[in-house]
């Protein structure tokens, strides 16, 4: 990570998988997010990047792609993803910072990022990096946490929170945890070179008392029915968007080199357990099947 890069959250050593997801009563969120992803993303393709994939909870939804780049900043999460998904050649595990992606320009024909961008203080910078790795007309499914949801609006009207859910600027409610206005995110995507084609509203029923009292199947069915309302007026805590890479774009190169040098952009080649820049500008390690771009080798 360069000195100028914004601060990032590192889930190294985190119990995110077991402390937040598995056995923690979030089946409703998991199932509805899978429905949204299936609605938005092409079922088949050559190479898809799952950015901020964590322990690979949603990566199995990308099974129709020839190659899946499982990218996260945490080596811990990537090792757990290997345990969950396996180590076949279909999956390429990459430890990297989304603010400085080591993937070659135009090298992916699709990308997915869910439950990640709420940790980004500089959304435009992250989106520019993602746009660069995508081939022309590639789809990009992005989920973001919305500040303009019904609970936040009610709390604001009752004067139980200070920040305004209708204000366009992001709100940082905990250090490096942001909620975004849908129109702010739409503007950032447009300026980064994306055209938003669809928008789904999720998790209207993300309330503990509802999840305890209403059958899961009914909550999921109702959420499925309400998701399309996001196209007109998303007032939900979570929003999924389908965006397409447009404008000035690198040539499609999904069959070319996957990795690029983080210093000069040159091609990387692998020698044993080391990735080496063809221009001599950098070297990075490969540890236990994980391409590690968090720090260069000395």
Image (cartoon, rainbow, N blue to C red):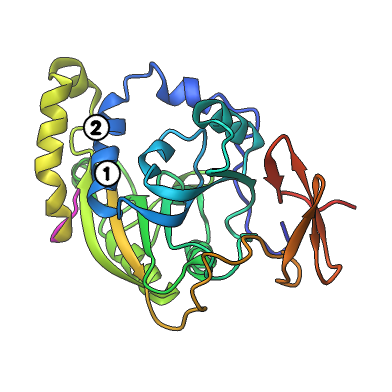
Q: Predominant secondary structure in magenta?
A: loop
At mark 2, the secondary structure is loop
Q: What residue span does the magenta drawing correspond to?
A: 232-237
Q: Locate residue 157, reporting x and y percent.
A: 19, 47
**Where on the picture, by quarter, is residue 28?**
top left
Q: Is residue 77 left or right of residue 116?
A: right
Q: State the residue at coordinates (63%, 46%).
A: 94
Say whether residue 78 is visible.
yes
Q: Which residue is mark 1?
A: 237
- Identified at 23% across, 40% down, the residue is 35
Marks counted in the figure total: 2
Task: Between residue 134 and residue 3, name the one nearer to us.
Answer: 134
Query: Do the CB atoms of the residues marked 1 and 2 lie less than 8 Å apart?
Result: yes
Q: Position of residue 203 (x, y in %)?
A: 23, 38
Most distant residue in the right direction: 298
Kind of element beneath mark 1: loop
Side of 91 relative to 187 (left or right): right
């Amino acid at each position: 990570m360069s000195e100028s890069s914004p601060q990032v959250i590192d889930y190294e050593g985190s119990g995110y998988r077991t402390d937040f997801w598995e056995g923690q009563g979030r089946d409703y969120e998991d199932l509805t997010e899978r429905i949204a992803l299936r609605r938005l993303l092409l079922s088949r393709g050559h190479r898809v990047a799952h950015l901020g994939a964590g322990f690979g909870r949603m990566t199995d939804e990308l099974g129709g792609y020839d190659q899946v780049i499982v990218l996260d900043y945490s080596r811990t999460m990537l090792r757990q993803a290997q345990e969950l998904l396996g180590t076949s050649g279909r999956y390429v595990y990459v430890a990297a910072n989304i603010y400085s992606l080591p993937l070659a320009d135009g090298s992916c024909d699709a990308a997915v990022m869910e439950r990640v961008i709420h940790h980004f203080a500089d959304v435009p910078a992250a989106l520019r990096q993602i746009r660069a790795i995508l081939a022309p007309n590639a789809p990009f499914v992005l989920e973001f946490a919305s500040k303009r949801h019904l609970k936040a609006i009610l709390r604001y009207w009752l004067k139980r929170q200070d920040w305004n859910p209708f204000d366009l600027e992001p709100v940082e409610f905990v250090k490096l945890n942001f909620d975004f206005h849908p129109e702010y995110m739409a503007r950032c995507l447009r300026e980064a070179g994306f055209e938003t084609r669809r928008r789904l509203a999720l998790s209207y029923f993300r309330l503990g008392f509802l999840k305890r009292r209403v059958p899961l199947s009914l909550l999921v069915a109702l959420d499925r029915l309400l998701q399309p309302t996001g196209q007109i007026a998303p007032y939900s805590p979570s929003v999924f968007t389908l965006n397409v890479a447009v404008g000035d774009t690198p040539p499609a190169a999904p069959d070319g080199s996957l990795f690029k040098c983080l210093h000069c952009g040159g091609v990387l080649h692998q020698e044993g357990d080391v990735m080496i820049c063809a221009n001599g500008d950098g070297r990075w390690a490969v540890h236990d099947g994980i391409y590690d771009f968090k720090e260069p080798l000395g």
